[in-house]
Image (cartoon, helix red, strand yellow):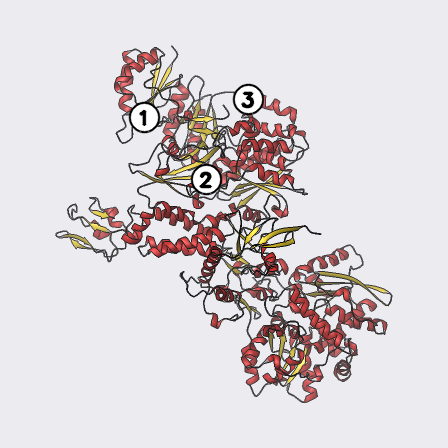
Amino acid sequence: MKKIVKAKINGILIRAEEGTTILDAAKKVQVKIPTLCKHPDLKPSASCGLCIVKVKGSNKMLRACCTPLDEGMDIITHDPEIVDIRRTVLELILSNHPNDCLKCDRNNDCELQKLVADFGIRQSPFTQVLRDLPIDNSTKAVELEPQKCILCGRCVDVCQNRQDVWALSFLERGMQTRISPAGDILLNESPCVKCGQCSAHCPTGAIVEQDDIGKVWEALLDPDKYCVVQIAPAVRASIGEAFGLTGKNMTKQLYALLRRLGFKAVFDTNFAADVTIMEEASEFEERLIKGTKSLPLITSCCPAWVDFMEKFHSDMIEHFSSCKSPHEILGVLSKTYYTQKNGLDPSKITMVSIMPCTAKKYEITRSNEMSASGFQDIDIVLSTRELARMIKQAGIDFLSLPDEEADSMLGEYAGAGVIFGATGGVMEAALRTAYYFVTGTDLGKVEFESVRGLKGIKETEIEVAGKKIRIAIAHGLGNVEIVLDKVREAKKNNQEPPYHFIEVMACPGGCVGGGGQPYMVTDELRLKRAKVLYQDDTDKQIRCSHQNPYIKRLYTEFLEKPLGPKPEKLLHTKYTPRPIYKR
Amino acid sequence: MDKKIVLLKDTSIGAADKTKEYYSLILNLLRDHNLQDSVQVVRVADIGFYDQGLVLKILPEQVIYGRVQESDLLPVITETIQGNKILDRLALKPNEKQLRIVLRNCGQIDPENFDDYIAADGYAALKKVITGYKQEQVIEELKASGLRGRGGAGYPTWMKWNFARQVKAEQKYIVCNGDEGDPGAYMDRSVLEGDPHSVIEGMMIGAYAIGASQGYFYIRAEYPLAVERIQKAIAQAYEYGLLGKNILGTEFSFDVEIRLGAGAFVCGEETALLASIEGKRGTPQPRPPYPSIKGLWGMPTVINNVETLANIPVILLKGGAWFGKTGTEKSKGTKVFALTGKIKNSGLIEVPMGTSIRDIVYNIGGGMLSAKGIKAVQTGGPSGGVIPKEFLDEPVDYENLQKLGSIMGSGGMIVMDEDDCLVDIAKFYLKFCVEESCGKCAPCRIGGYQMLGLLENITNGKGTNSDVAKMKRIAQAMQKASLCGLGQTAANPVLSTIKYFAAEYKEHIEDKKCIAGKCRYLLNYKIISDKCKKCGLCLTNCVFGAITGNREQGYVLDSAKCTKCGRCYEVCKFKAISKG
Amino acid sequence: MTKLTKASFDQHKAEIQATSKNWIKVGMSTCGIAAGAEEVYKILLEEAKKKNLSIEIKKCGCLGMCYAEPLVEVHVEGVPQVIYGKVNKDIAIKILEKHVGTKMLVNDYIFDLALTMKEVRK
C-alpha cells in the first residue's frame, strides 16, 4: 500500500497516493491544467512550460506534470498571473509554429490549436520565426514535417524508450533544435520501422501518416478500376471515436459505408486472419510434432515487428512464421481466388486496406512476395485516421448508417479472426486451432484469459495433449529484447527453448493501439477497444478458424491444404537481414 | 647592519610615473650616507598599493610607507634605515585584502608533483577523516563551516551530502562539476590546473561522507591542460595508494574517472550534466527527484563544483569553526573571482565573503584601466546582473548580490566603464544564453530568442517603448516557466539593466542615441571641417560611397549612405571625424 | 612506488619536507602558457645549466596575477622571495645573473602583490 498524502488544490482538500503528480491529482478534483507535452502514455518531459502552478510559500512556479503532490501542499492552478504566463508561453510557441491550420492534417484535431482556442488568442505579439526545414516523406508511411514540431519530445520518447527503435532524436540546440534521425539522414535510411507511434503521440501535425486518400478517390472514380476493400480487426473498435463514439463495434456500419463510398466488394481482414491461423497453426504443429524446424515459432503478422526483426534481430529469422500477414493474404486471394471465381481481370482490381497501422503502408512493397498474384497484391493502405477524414469528405452521416454484411466469399470470419487486433489475440486464435490440429479434438473452453491484458510481457503455459506448451507475448517493441534474449541464452547453452511459441506486436496493446489509430490513446482506451473485439468473438457462433465454413471452402476449392504448394506460393514469404542504417 | 632592500613605486593615478626620479634621488641620498653597498634600491612594477603616491617598502622589516614626499626621503634613510625607527605619519598597514584558502596551493606547488602536494599538507585531511571520523562527523564539520556551493546557487554543501548519505543504495556517486562556462570566468580552470590534488582530496572526503565508491570529474573539453593535470594527479594518487581499493590500508575504497563535456553550457546544470555523463543528450530533467536522492543511473549522486571541493580539505584539517570565522553571517569563507574588464590588474583573486566591491576594484584590481569612470560591475555571468557604481560599497555575499538584482554565480566579475553600453552588455549576455539554450523547453528556447530580437531592435534604432514592456513580459514567462536555471535566469542581465539603466534604454529608444558609442547603428559620423586637412584618406577608405568631395573643397559625409562601419573614423589621422 | 599506508604516509611527508633548496617557479597554467611561460621556462633551464647555477627550476599553477604573466617566483637563500612579472627571455636571463648569481633584485619587474595575499597555509 502506498502512503496517502493530503494536500489542497485551489482550496479543495485532496488525498492522493504518494507519487501522484499535481497534474493527475488536479484531475481528481475536476481541475484541468493545460499541457502540450505530457501524454498519459509517457513520462513527463517537462518541456512546454504550460502546466506551471503556484505552491503557497514558494515564489517559484512548479510544473504540475512532473512534480509529485507533497504532504500539506497548497496549490493554486489558475490565477490571473499564472494564466497570463501560460498565455505568453503559448504565444511564444505560436510565434515558432506555422499558422496554416486550415491546410494542416491535424486541423480540428490538434492539441495546440485547441489550447490556442481555449485561451482565446487573437493576436500574435511576437515576430513569426519559422525554420526552413524540408518535409521527410521518405518512408511512404509516416511523414515528418519538422516546421510544425513544438519539440514536446513525445515522439522521441516513444521511439527510443517505448519502442527501442531510436530512429528519432533531437538534433542541435537552441532555436535550431529539431527532431530528426541521428546524423541528419532521412527516415527510411534510419532504423525507423514505420510503427507510427510517433505520429499517434504527436500533439500537432509534425508527424502524420502519409495521406493516401487522394489515391483512393482517384481509383474509385476510375471507370476502368474495380475497387475492393478490406478492414482490419482493430479499425472497427476505434473508428467511432473520430465521431465521438468510444467502445462501439462499427463493423456493420463500416461495410455499409465502404459500399456507399463506391467499393464493388467489401471484405474483412478477419477472414484472412482465419487463413493465417490455418497456416501458422500448421507450421506450429509441424515444428512441435514433426520437429522439422526449431522452436520457438514467432508470429510475423505485424509489419513493423518484421522490419524491426530484420534490422535488429535477424538471427531470429529461422524462428519466424513464414506466413504472410492477414491483409496481404486477403490481397493475394482477391486477385486470384476472387477474380477467378467471378470471372474478373485481376489487373483491373484496386485493393484497398483500411488498417490501424502505418507500417502496412510500407509492407505492401516490402518484398517480391507481396506481389504473389502477379500484381501488387495490395494497392493502397489507409489508416483508421485517414478513413475517418474520408468519411467526412464524402459527407456521409456515418453513425446513422444501416447495418450491412460483408461480401461473403472473403468476408465471413470466426471469432478467432477478430481478436487478432488485441495483444495476445493471434496467440489465442492460433492455440484454438493448433490444439485441434495436434489433438484432433476441439477445445471445450476456447478463451485463454492468461494471454489477454496490457502487461508488457505475458508468459504462460498451456497443456496440449499432455504436453506443456510455453508461450510468451510481447507488445511494444521495447519489450521484445528481454524475450528474445532468453531464447538466445538457451540456444547458447544448448538448452531446451524457453518458449514454444512467441507473439509480438510492435504497438503497445497490439493493433488496437496501432500507430494509425485515432489520437490521444491511453491504456484505458486500449482496453476499451480490445473489449469490443473480445465481445465480437464471444458473440460469434463459430470461434475457431478451422471451423469457419468459408475457410473450409477456400481450401477445398482453391488452396488445397495448409502449407501445400499453392499456399506456399501465395501465402508465405521470406525474410532477410537488413542494415539498421542505410548509409 | 644587515643588508636592507628598499622597494619603491610611484602609485599616483592621473600623473606621470615618477618612480625613476625617486629612484635616483634615493640612490644619491644613500651614497651621501655611504650606504650604497648595504642597501639595495629596487624599482618594482606593482607594490600592492594604489593611489597612495610614492610607496616604499623596506625589507626585511616589511615597513611600508605611503604618500612619501621628496622631503621625507632623508628622514626615511636616517631614521628608519639607519635608526630602525618607524615614521608613523607615513606608515601604511599591509594591504591584505585577499585571503587564499581555495588558492592556497595555486602558484605555490608544482601541480604535477605529488610530493609537492604532500609537503603542503596534502591528503592529511583525507587521512584524518578516513582513519578517525564517522560519516556524520564529517558532515557536522561541514555544517559548522557554513560552506555553501560555489557553483552559483549557494546551496549548503552539508545538506546535499547529508541527503545522499541518508539514502540507502547499492551504489552512490560523487561528481565534480568542472564545466565552467560563464564568459570571462576561469576560477575552476585555475584550481584544476594549479592544484588538482586538492580537488581530488575534497571529492574523496565527500565520497567517504556519503558512502560513494565512484567519482567522476566532468570537465569541459576546452580545458585540455586542466584535464591533463587531473589525469596525472589521478594516476599519481593510484600509484601511491590514495585511490583504489583500501586506501591507506583502511576499509575505504574509491575510484575516479574523467568525463569530458563537449561544449554545451547547459551541461553545467546538474541534471543535464548527469545525462551527459550517462551518454545521453545533455538536457535538464525535471526535479524532484533531486540528484542527491536519484542521480547517475538512478543512484544517489552528489554534484559539487571545483571550488567547493577545493575548500573541503582545509575545512577538515583546520575545523569547520575555523572556516566559519571568515565571511559574513550567511556566507562563510572566501570566494574566488575572475576579475576582468576595464581594470588594471585583471586576474584571479580570492577575498573573504563580505569584502566590498570597492575594495575589490580599487585595492586589489588596482583601479580603472583608463581615466574613464566606473559605470557598473557585472557578476554572475549570463545568469547574473549589473551592479551600478552607487552600490560599490556593498559587501559581496550570496544574499546581498541577490538583493541587488544579481547573483554570486560561479565568480565572474567584469568591471565596466563609461565606454560600455549597458544595453549592448545585456544583449551580449542574452545572446549567449539564446545560443546555449538546450532547446528543450519553450519559454527559454523561444522566449530568449524573441527577447533578443527586441533588444536588437533597440540597439538598431528601431525600438519602441512597447518593446521594453514586451521584454518584461517574456522575462516573467522565462523566469517562472523555464525548466532549469539557465532559462529561469537568462533574462536577469536584461532585467537588471532595465532596472538600473532605464535612462540608457530611453536614449536608445527615444533619442536613437548610444552615448557609449557601442551600438553601431545609432552612431552618426560627421566630418568636422575645422579639423579636416583635406587629405582624402576617408574618401579612399569609404567603400560605400558615403563620402564625397575633393582636396580643394574638402569632404562631406552623407549619413543616408553611411553604414556606420567606422572605417573613416579609424583612418583619420587628424581626429576630424566625430562619432556619436 | 609502494602504496602508502597510515604509518608510511607521515614518514614520507617528513622526508620530503626536510629537503629545502633554492628554486625558481614559473606559472604554467593556461594563462601563463598563453603569455609565453613555456619559452621562459625553457630559457631558465638552459641558462641555469649553462651558467652552472645550483637552482631548481619548477612549474607551478596560476598565481592569480594574470595581467602580469608570465610570472616567475624566485627563492634564493638570503634574498627576499619575490615574484617577477611580464618576464621575457632577457629578463629571465637577468634574473639568473643578478638575482640568483649576485643576490641582487632586478629592477622594474617585481610584482609585490604576494605580500597582499594572506595564505592559509603559512
Same-chain status of marks 1 and 3: no
How far is mark 2 from mark 3, CA to CA? 38 Å
Q: Position of residue A450 (x, y in %)?
A: 77, 64
The kind of secondary structure element at disc 1 is loop
Q: Is residue A81 above or below residue B5?
A: below
Question: Which quarter of the rendering shows the C terminus of chain A?
Answer: bottom right
Q: Which chain carries label 2?
A: B
| Residue marked by disc 2 | B408
Q: In this view, does C48 lie above or below A350?
A: above
Q: Position of residue B568 (x, y in %)?
A: 24, 49
Left or right, B381 with respect to B73, comes to right
Q: What residue type is labelled 1?
A: Gln
Q: In front: mark 1 or mark 3?
A: 1
How far is mark 2 from mark 1, CA to CA? 30 Å
Left or right, A331 with respect to B411, comes to right
Q: In this view, does A440 lie above or below B46?
A: below
How far is mark 1 from mark 3, CA to CA? 40 Å
- The residue positioned farthest toward the right in the image shown: A466
| Marks 2 and 1, the one that precedes in the sequence | 1
Q: Position of residue A555 (x, y in %)?
A: 76, 81
For the question of whether residue A577 can be seen, the reply is no
The picture quadrant where one finds residue B44 is top left
Same-chain status of marks 2 and 1: yes
